[in-house]
Image (tube, rainbow, N blue to C red):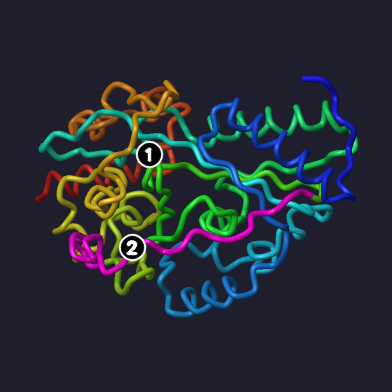
């Protein structure tokens, strides 16, 4: 594609620039792209502080640090003018067995941090080639961005009652990432209206009652939190007795969501399950050495739980 003159100061220029960026993002394999102005998240910060004040974050104390950075993109990238928000469908045509050792769908394939990050870095590199004045910062979950909030602001979908982003085309089976840019672009006109309606299937299906109210999750009750984020030597008994076979993460609230029943299969082959990642053998986990663990979960999101966490989870399932 020939280099295009940067005209971010004009409405016509920003519209053309935005269209080119969106088009190339889709060529890279992103399934949805939206652009929103980089500005502080005032209302969202209030809701975050209320949630933290209720202790719903559990052991995730990193959420309490640097609130300015988490709610203001300029703290991450001072030159930020725009936030390009992307979503990638990761749904594949596989199902769990009934045996214990179930793994959350998001961790079946290669680590999404690498996949989404690679695509965003390619997008930033292309933007810099076209417009040398452009600078940016790639964000994929690790950076303190409120990913789901930015995706909703950019018109990619809405936050469901289970607190996951729901898109009309792919349900909630999407990974989200952002690219902060120092360019003035054309921004999303409006957010997508909440389409959960009167449905409460996710609240009713959660075996531990972690969705304590629509749009509010108490992480301390959540199976995903207990099996991934918690570093406690044993899973809380109130959660352990209701694991329902989950070794790593939990998809129950997403599995029952009506918006997830017709998701098309992704064409990104790296999201296809690795061997043993749909249902994992409890014996294999309990017998893993550190070296075998490092090899088995290299470039896998499952390394987030660490070897001690996976063994703790497997033992909790074995004890049921």
Label 1: element kind: helix
Which picture quadrant has residue 37?
A: bottom right
Mark number, residue 106: 1
Q: Nearer the viewer, mark 2 or mark 1?
A: 2
Q: Is residue 257 left or right of residue 297?
A: left
Mark number, residue 196: 2
Q: Position of residue 185 (x, y in %)?
A: 77, 48
Which picture quadrant has residue 202?
A: bottom left
Question: Which residue is located at x 44 percent, y 28 percent?
Answer: 110
Q: Position of residue 285 (x, y in %)?
A: 26, 33
Mark 2 touching mark 1, by CB under 8 A? Answer: no
Question: Which residue is located at x 77 percent, y 42 percent?
Answer: 136
Instruction: Give the overall secondary structure of the magenta segment.
Output: loop
- Number of numbered markers: 2
Label 2: element kind: loop
- Residue 125 in the magenta stretch? The answer is no
What's the magenta region? 185-209
Which picture quadrant has residue 300?
A: top left
Q: Position of residue 66 (x, y in %)?
A: 66, 66
Question: Which residue is located at x 36 percent, y 64 percent?
Answer: 219
* Earlier residue among tags 2 and 1: 1
Q: Position of residue 44 (x, y in %)?
A: 57, 71
Q: Is residue 269 left or right of residue 233?
A: right
């Amino acid at each position: 594609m020939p280099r295009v003159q940067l005209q971010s100061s004009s409405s016509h220029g920003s519209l053309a620039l935005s269209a080119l960026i969106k088009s190339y993002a889709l060529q890279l394999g992103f399934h949805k792209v939206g652009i929103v102005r980089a500005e502080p998240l005032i209302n969202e910060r209030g809701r975050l502080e209320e949630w933290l004040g209720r202790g719903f974050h559990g052991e995730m104390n990193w959420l309490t640090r640097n609130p300015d950075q988490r709610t203001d993109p300029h703290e991450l990238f001072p030159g930020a003018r725009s936030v390009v928000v992307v979503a990638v469908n990761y749904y594949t045509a596989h199902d769990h067995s009934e045996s214990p050792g179930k793994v959350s769908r998001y961790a079946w394939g290669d680590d999404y941090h690498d996949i989404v990050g690679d695509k965003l870095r390619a997008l930033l590199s292309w933007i810099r080639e076209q417009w040398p004045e452009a600078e940016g910062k790639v964000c994929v979950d690790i950076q303190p961005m409120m990913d789901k909030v930015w995706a909703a602001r950019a018109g990619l979908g809405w936050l469901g009652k289970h607190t996951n982003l729901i898109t009309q085309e792919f349900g909630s089976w999407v990974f989200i990432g952002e690219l902060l840019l120092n360019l003035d672009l054309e921004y999303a006109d409006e957010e997508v209206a909440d389409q959960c309606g009167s449905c409460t299937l996710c609240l009713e299906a959660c075996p531990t009652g972690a969705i304590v109210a629509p749009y509010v999750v108490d992480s301390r009750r959540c199976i995903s939190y207990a099996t991934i984020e918690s570093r406690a030597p044993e899973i809380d008994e109130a959660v352990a007795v209701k694991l329902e076979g989950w070794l790593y993460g939990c998809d129950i609230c997403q599995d029952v969501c009506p918006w997830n029943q017709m998701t098309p299969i992704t064409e990104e082959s790296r999201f296809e399950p690795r061997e043993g990642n749909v249902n994992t053998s409890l014996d294999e986990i309990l017998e893993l050495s550190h070296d075998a663990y490092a090899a088995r979960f290299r470039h896998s999101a499952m390394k987030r739980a660490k070897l001690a966490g996976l063994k703790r989870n497997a033992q909790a399932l074995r004890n049921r």
